[in-house]
Image: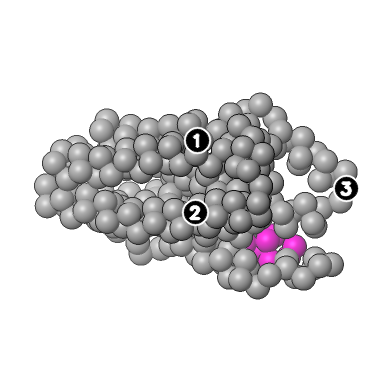
């Protein structure tokens, strides 16, 4: 085991690696928004800034430092990095902004990339759910949670996975940006219910079965934080999802026509 001082220095280095992409994304988004020929909505800029801020809070600074020794702090970071930040960032429509800002040639390359088979598979509701919820089950029910606090590269990979899986999960159900393939509302609703159930069951499992090295009391409070905090974010996703469903129905288009599966 590393001493506390050694661990802190190692993780400060790892935290910097994790923080840089978010800082770059924040800068590029603002640059594109403020130089766009067509006015970009201010509320999307605000959502993007909040999403990036929550991501940064999760990977660098006091909360990130404390999450190495406090499971409650770790769980709060998980809620920010894997759930709330991806929701805010997806609502900011970064791809739509990118297509507005990029040249035609680069836009075509980006469109081709989005239509590539690996990405089409990754944003399938079932695949995204397995990556997201399945990944959390692996993290908290195996020795992976303990290993990521001992090896910096595992720590970085786990946090990259938590964010990317959370983002893919969000855009797989909420179509804010263009997607290569749209699935029906009914299908997405069914998968969404199963995914939320998997998250809720995992929080109860953690409450009763603390990950290795986590004190029972911390596991109980962190399990409740994951359960109730996750519910709040789930409700936000459901509200947006139902609004999109209602909006599509209101346009007088049949659901099967609007969202061919």
Q: Is residue 104 left or right of residue 95?
A: right
Disc nearer the start of the sequence (3/1): 3
Q: Nearer the viewer, mark 3 or mark 2?
A: 2
Is 27 left, or right, of 3 in this rendering? right
Residue at disc 3, secondary structure: helix
Q: Which residues are magenta?
A: 26-32
Q: Which residue is mark 2?
A: 242
Taking the magenta stretch, the answer to whether it contains residue 55 is: no
Task: Identify residue for label 3.
Answer: 104
Image quarter of residue 76: bottom left
Q: Which residue is nearer to you in this view: 66 or 81?
A: 81
**Helix, strand or loop for disc 1:** helix
Q: Is residue 201 above or below residue 11?
A: above
Q: Relative to 30, is 10 on the left or the right?
A: left
Q: Which quadrant would the C terminus be assigned to in this image? A: top right
Q: Secondary structure at mark 2?
A: helix
Q: Position of residue 184 (x, y in %)?
A: 56, 38
Q: Mark 1 — residue?
A: 187
- Which residue is most to the top? 117
Compared to residue 188, the image places residue 174 above or below, namely below
Say which residue appears at 66% left-offset and 39% top-offset.
257
Q: Residues within 10 Å of mark 3 (few under 14, many from 20)?
A: few
User: In the image, what residue occupies the spot 62% across and 66% down?
Assistant: 44
């Amino acid at each position: 085991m590393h001493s506390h001082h050694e661990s802190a220095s190692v993780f400060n280095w790892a935290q910097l690696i994790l923080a840089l992409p978010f800082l770059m994304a924040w800068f590029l988004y603002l640059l594109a928004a403020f130089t766009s020929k067509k006015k970009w909505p201010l509320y999307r800029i605000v959502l993007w800034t909040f999403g990036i801020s929550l991501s940064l809070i999760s990977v660098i600074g006091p909360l990130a430092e404390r999450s190495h020794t406090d499971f409650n702090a770790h769980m709060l970071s998980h809620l920010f990095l894997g759930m709330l930040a991806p929701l805010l960032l997806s609502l900011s429509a970064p791809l739509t902004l990118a297509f507005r800002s990029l040249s035609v040639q680069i836009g075509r390359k980006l469109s081709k990339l989005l239509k590539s088979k690996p990405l089409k598979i990754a944003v399938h509701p079932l695949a995204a759910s397995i990556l997201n919820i399945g990944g959390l089950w692996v993290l908290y029910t195996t020795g992976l949670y303990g290993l990521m606090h001992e090896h910096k590269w595992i720590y970085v990979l786990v946090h990259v996975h938590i964010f990317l899986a959370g983002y893919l999960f969000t855009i797989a159900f909420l179509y804010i940006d263009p997607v290569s393939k749209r699935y029906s509302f009914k299908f997405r609703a069914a998968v969404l219910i199963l995914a939320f159930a998997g998250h809720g069951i995992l929080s109860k499992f953690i409450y009763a079965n603390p990950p290795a090295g986590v004190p029972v009391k911390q596991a109980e409070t962190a399990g409740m934080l994951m359960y109730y905090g996750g519910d709040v974010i789930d409700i936000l996703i459901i509200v947006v999802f139902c609004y999109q469903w209602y909006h599509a129905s209101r346009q007088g288009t049949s659901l099967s026509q609007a969202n061919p599966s």
